[in-house]
Amino acid sequence: PYVKMYLVKGRKCLEKQKTTTARATREPFYQQSLAFKEDIKGCFLQ
């Protein structure tokens, strides 16, 4: 499993990021930072 995040403004996806895959675990714990290059003002994460 992994986490995929989209930076969305209106209906347009400005950028997407994905964590590394957590293998061989039933309870993955993600402690990774995702940095977006776009300005996040007026946007939301999906």
Image (cartoon, rainbow, N blue to C red):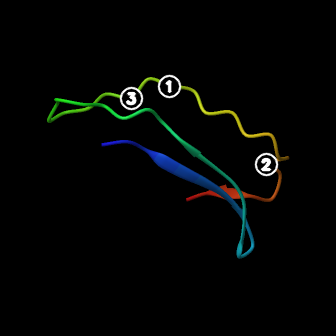
Under circle 2, the secondary element is loop
Mark 1: amino acid = Gln
Q: Quadrant of the C terminus?
A: bottom right
Between discs 2 and 3, the one toward the N terminus: 3
Task: Tell me the distance, in whole angstroms, between the alpha carbons under discs 2 and 3.
Answer: 22 Å
Q: How many marks?
A: 3
For the point 74% across and 58% down, the residue is: 43
Q: Which residue is mark 3?
A: 30
> In the shown orientation, is residue 14 left or right of residue 30?
right
Q: Quadrant of the N terminus?
A: top left
Identify whether 21 is placed above or below 39: above
Mark 3: amino acid = Tyr
Which quarter of the picture shows residue 11? bottom right
Q: Residue 40, which numbered label?
A: 2
Task: Tell me the distance, in whole angstroms, between the alpha carbons under discs 1 and 3.
Answer: 6 Å
Which quarter of the picture shows residue 2? top left
Task: Tell me the distance, in whole angstroms, between the alpha carbons under discs 2 and 1.
Answer: 19 Å
Kindly report which numbered mark, 2 or 3, lies closer to the viewer in this rendering.
3
Mark 2: amino acid = Ile
Q: From the viewer's side, name the closer residue of 41 and 4.
A: 4
For the point 17% across and 29% down, the residue is: 24
Under circle 1, the secondary element is loop
Identify whether 11 is placed above or below 27: below
Circles 1 and 3, Cβ within 8 Å, touching? The answer is yes
Crowd tier of the residue under label 3, counting other residues whose Cα lies within 10 Å: few below 14, some 14–19, many 20 or above: few
Q: Which residue is mark 1?
A: 32
